[in-house]
Image (cartoon, helix red, strand yellow):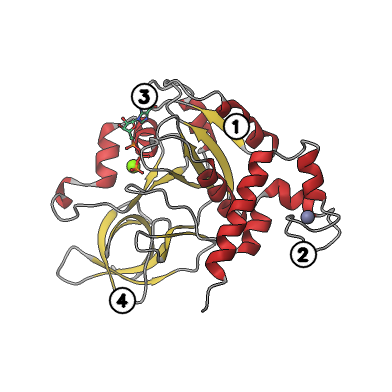
């Protein structure tokens, strides 16, 4: 066997599970400390003589990457080569829509499509959810209410994921892993893709896993995710709220940030009800937050 390209399907800190072009899955280590492959990466890898492990020697160039600050506040890449973000919320934990907005913003920036999934539909939710989901639908995002527990609308979610590589993101505890398990149906597949028998005890925590769905498409789960949202710059926020960016074409100033500038088409659209007040407030809040973070003394 010689060097070949492979897909990263699971990561466990510095170790990875690779899928080779013939479908075989092999364990791999990373050569050196400079490269940091993530789920969804295509990598160059070669078998090591006299041992079962493979060695990853390089990462092929990425079409895009989703980044987010980690627990220590350092920006890290969550996954690469993403076609779609499925942003999940639920009645519990209490939805933080600004986190959903940030992920939608990130999707726009990395040129991935996005949909909003409201899980745990079997639980009693707040009535305001209808309005929020309607607002997302109105600006062109697909929205689905589902329940990983009862299976309600799972087919609709499955249909959303049928092609390309998707990643499910959202607050911890909304049911991302539960939904994926429901979609996988086949228990054996589920177990095999995350921890093969042979790997038991060797990799205790899976950072992230890419799973092939039975009806096509693949989905990335990232467990252990806290309430961290993507790291964004102010300029990115301005283009990442799609309806605000679109209305902003009509502002008097090309660099309008839609705050207090005269001739602002966005503010007018908010007053007329064409842009949701909640989304506009979320935009202003995120803009203020990112501006504060990026205008420090350094
Ligand atoms: N009632 C109800 N509970 C659900 C549903 N989906 C998931 N849960 C429960 O919600 C809890 C969290 O589910 P997980 O799938 O672990 O959530 P997660 O989003 O993967 O969480 P992290 O990995 O921490 O980010 C579990 O107790 C699930 O049983 C659902 O549709 N309805
Ligand atoms: Mg999980
Ligand atoms: Zn404006």
Gap in Å between the C-alphas at discs 3 and 2? 47 Å
Badge nearest the viewer, 4 or 3: 3
> Residue 149's mark?
3
Sooner in the amino-acid sequence: mark 1 or mark 3:
1
Drawn side of residue 190 relative to residue 287, left or right: left
Q: Which residue is mark 4?
A: 33
> In the figure, residue 114 lies in which quadrant?
top right
Q: Which residue is mark 1?
A: 133
Sooner in the amino-acid sequence: mark 4 or mark 3:
4
Neighbor class of circle 1 (other Cα within 10 Å; few <14, some 14-19, many 20+) is some
Q: Quadrant of ligand 3?
A: bottom right
Figure check: 97 above or below 283: above
SS for tag 3?
A: loop
Figure check: 4 above or below 90: below
Q: Residue at x 63, y 37 (%)?
A: 136
**Whether the residue under disc 3 has CB within 8 Å of ligand 1:** yes
SS for tag 4?
A: loop
SS for tag 1?
A: helix
Badge nearest the viewer, 2 or 4: 2
Neighbor class of circle 4 (other Cα within 10 Å; few <14, some 14-19, many 20+) is few
Which of the pair 66/224 is nearer the observer?
224
Drawn side of residue 104 relative to residue 150, left or right: right
SS for tag 2?
A: loop
Q: Which residue is mark 2?
A: 255
């Amino acid at each position: 066997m010689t060097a070949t390209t492979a897909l990263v399907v699971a990561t466990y800190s510095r170790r990875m599970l690779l899928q080779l072009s013939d479908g075989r899955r092999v364990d791999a280590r990373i050569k050196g400390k400079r490269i940091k492959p993530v789920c969804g990466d295509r990598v160059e890898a070669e078998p090591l003589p006299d041992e079962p492990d493979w060695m990853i020697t390089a990462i092929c160039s990425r079409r895009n990457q989703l980044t987010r600050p980690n627990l220590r506040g350092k920006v890290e890449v969550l996954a690469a080569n993403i076609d779609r973000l499925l942003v999940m919320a639920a009645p519990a934990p209490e939805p933080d829509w600004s986190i959903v907005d940030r992920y939608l913003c990130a999707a726009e920036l990395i040129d991935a499509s996005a949909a909003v999934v409201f899980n745990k539909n079997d639980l009693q939710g707040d009535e305001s959810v209808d309005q929020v989901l309607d607002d997302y639908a109105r600006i062109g995002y697909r929205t689905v209410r589902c329940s990983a527990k009862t299976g309600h609308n799972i087919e609709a979610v499955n249909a959303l994921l049928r092609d390309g590589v998707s990643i499910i993101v959202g607050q911890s505890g909304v049911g991302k892993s539960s939904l994926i398990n429901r979609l996988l149906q086949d228990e054996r597949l589920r177990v095999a893709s995350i921890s093969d028998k042979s790997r038991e005890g060797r990799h205790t925590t899976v950072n992230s896993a890419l799973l092939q769905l039975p009806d096509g498409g693949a989905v990335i789960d990232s467990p252990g995710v806290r309430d961290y949202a993507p790291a964004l710059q102010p300029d990115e926020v301005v283009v990442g709220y799609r309806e605000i960016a679109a209305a902003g074409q009509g502002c008097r100033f090309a660099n309008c940030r839609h705050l207090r500038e005269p001739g602002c088409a966005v503010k007018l659209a908010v007053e007329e009800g064409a842009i949701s007040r909640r989304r506009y407030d979320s935009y202003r809040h995120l803009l203020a937050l990112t501006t504060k973070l990026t205008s420090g003394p350094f």
